Image (cartoon, helix red, strand yellow):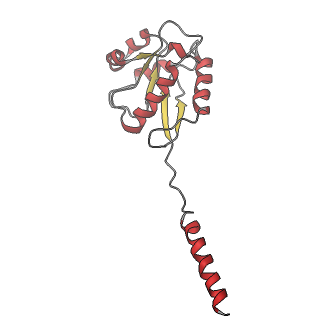
Amino acid sequence: MAQRPRLAQAVSLLLLAPLLLGCKPRHKSPTVVVHLLRNLNSPYGTDLDHRILDFQGSDPKLQSGAPIMVESSTGDYKQMLEKQTSSNQDVDLILLDSMDDAKSNPVIMSALSSAVNVCAGLKACPTNVPAIIPSQVGGDDREAAQDFVNFLQKTP
């Protein structure tokens, strides 16, 4: 008779073991932030704000599962453009108001050949809104910036 409670206890422990072993805390991937250089006062600025919110609302993730967040740089747009160099690590994506904005910086001017037009995703934009991912941006930062550019190229 005494063996019955021990047997029941052993069976219970065997049934609980997989549950307890399956409750390991999951390693959360760090958020990848796309640092965006743009003119906050541009004609399409408000629409871009809405598109950023739409992107964030879609819960974007890298292929690795890391979440993506877009953060706009604040400051004087023209000065920030002039300060861009081929080794800057503080900007992952540059959205110009027009092609003329690149004239103030030879590094940005040379990157225009790889720029894509994201005007389709913005309602109040001129005929061409160049988006540039600087060549020094790589890895997860580049993937996240490219995901955001792809999102902007789609009509809302």
Residue 130 sits in which quadrant?
top left
Q: Quadrant of the N terminus?
A: bottom right
- Above or below residue 23? Residue 115 is above
Residue 106 location (% of width, % of height): 33, 17
Count of numbered labels shown in the rendering: 0
Which residue is at the far bottom?
Answer: 2
Q: In the image, residue 84 lies at what x, y percent?
A: 39, 25
Instruction: Indicate whether 50 appears above or below 127.
Output: below
* Residue at x-position 52% and y-position 13%: 120
Q: Residue at the location (61% across, 18% down)?
A: 47
Name, please, the residue furthest toward the front.
1
Q: Give the residue displayed 63% in from the left and 23% down from the top.
A: 50
Q: Nearer the viewer, residue 148 or 96?
A: 148
Name above or below for residue 131 compared with residue 88.
above
Residue 109 location, x and y as percent? Answer: 35, 15
Work out which quarter of the rendered image holds the C terminus and state it.
Answer: top right
Residue at figure coordinates x 49%, y 18% from the top left: 153
